[in-house]
Amino acid sequence: MAKKKGETIVTVYPAWCKGCGICVNFCPGKVLEFDEHGKAYVARMEECIGCGFCELHCPDFAISVVAKDKKDNKNNSEHKDEGKN
Amino acid sequence: MVETTKLIHEYLRHSKKFPHVYCPGCGHGIVLGSIIRSVHHLGLSKDEVVLIAGIGCSGRMAVYVDFNTIHTTHGRALTFATGVKLANPKLKVIVVMGDGDALSIGGNHFIHAARRNIGVTALVLNNNIYGMTGGQSSSTTPENSYSTTTPYGHLERDFDVVNLALGCGANFVSRTTALHAQLMDKLLTKAIENPGFNVVEVLTPCFTQYGRKNKFKNVVEMYSWYRKNTIKVEKYKELPEEKRAGKIPIGVFSDKQEPGFEEKYGQLREKLRSKK
Ligand SMILES: Cc1ncc(C[n+]2csc(CCOP(=O)(O)OP(=O)(O)O)c2C)c(N)n1
Ligand code: SF4
Ligand code: SF4
Ligand code: SF4
């Protein structure tokens, strides 16, 4: 797993985030903050060391962390708005 | 890097309402992710896995994940699991229970399933409380802590799930917390493959029903508490007796490979048949 800064893309899916604060508080790089709706957002992508903590510990599967050089970088955008039924 | 979140979505039942019903920060969601990653890591197909849950917030997990699932009655998940495993020993059976489910109403089933060494993974989501029904004390609510039913403090002692399982002779006995997801993945991966009765206790925070009554300001503080108060079991064993107080050991406490009940039953059946 990448340990250098700036080699990863972190994405938060606001529709699934419940604003619990796990990622915001435990991220070693202070990459994430709360927006005005109380949801997590990526404030400092360049500080991410790609440790994967946020992705493993988000209880709502609302964050993904992928390597920048990964070709298949679509993330889960197809799931972004699911669950509204 | 594995695209973990993408992977998890492949195993969720997207016909169900998401985000799931759990409160913000509830550790049950982290456990759900860990189950999925462990099954994927083992290369099992969805159809080879049966997830059997009781009733409680923990039990809701059976609704969300796309394996064979049975959402059973409160406290009885292990009995359904015993039947499934005996009927088709090839299936990997994962039983998800809350502390109330596994050790209060279901305590008797728990000790006898462990003693019998039936080949299932018993995942105990220990949040020290009855989450779903309003925060009544359970058999793992710590002494002196507060709950809906013990507003002046709990007078009873709590079960130590690991020691209980060890005493009943379970093959594999382990403990982790929802903050230690990597350890959880490791333990679950091992437990699913191991023969006989395998226990994974996960300490998981319920801020809604337990935390806020017990001086935690938010759920993040409960995760920080796990970080501060847990210690790897190997290190714990090296500590002198007086330094152990208040420390919760995590890791593997027993790792036996004795044959499961269903295996012995199968062998006996073969033997009796060949005598005919
Ligand atoms: C036979 C029976 N008794 C009682 C109940 C009510 N009940 C539902 S869930 C529950 C306890 C839930 O606590 P736990 O098992 O620890 O799971 P959690 O919700 O904390 O995950 C109780 C007492 C029930 N559904 N069935
Ligand atoms: S851990 Fe997940 S749900 Fe919690 S604040 Fe972060 S993105 Fe939102
Ligand atoms: S991968 Fe690690 S460093 Fe990057 S945002 Fe997540 S927790 Fe922070
Ligand atoms: S009540 Fe407790 S156990 Fe139930 S979803 Fe909320 S935090 Fe989780």
Image: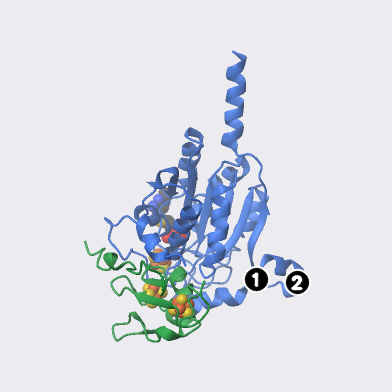
Q: Position of residue B246 (x, y in %)?
A: 65, 73
Say whether marks 2 and 1 touch (CB < 8 Å).
yes
Question: What kind of residue is marked 1?
Answer: Ile
Q: Is residue B270 above or below residue B206?
A: above
Q: Local crowd at mark 1 within 10 Å, few (<14), some, or many (≥20)?
A: some
Q: Which residue is mark 1?
A: B231
Q: Is residue B48 above or below residue A31?
A: above
Question: Residue lying furthest right in this view?
Answer: B240
**Is B208 positioned to the left or the right of B244 in the image?**
left
Task: Report the chain shown in blue.
Answer: B
Task: Report the chain shown in green.
Answer: A
Res B107 visible = no
| Element class at badge 2 | loop
Total numbered circles: 2
**Within the displayed image, which quadrant is ligand 1 positioned in?**
bottom left
Q: Which residue is mark 2?
A: B239
**Is A18 positioned to the left or the right of A27 in the image?**
left
Lower sequence index among marks 2 and 1: 1
Q: Are marks 2 and 1 on the same chain?
A: yes
Question: What kind of residue is marked 2?
Answer: Leu
Q: Position of residue B17 (x, y in %)?
A: 27, 60
* The C terminus of chain B, quarter of image: top right
Label placed on residue B241: none
Mark 2 sits near ligand 1, with its Cβ under 8 Å away: no
Q: Position of residue B68 (x, y in %)?
A: 39, 45
Res B263 visible = yes
Task: Identify the image's colour scheme: rainbow, by chain, secondary structure or one colour.
Answer: by chain
Question: Residue lying furthest top in this view?
Answer: B276
Q: Is residue B137 above or below residue A29?
A: above
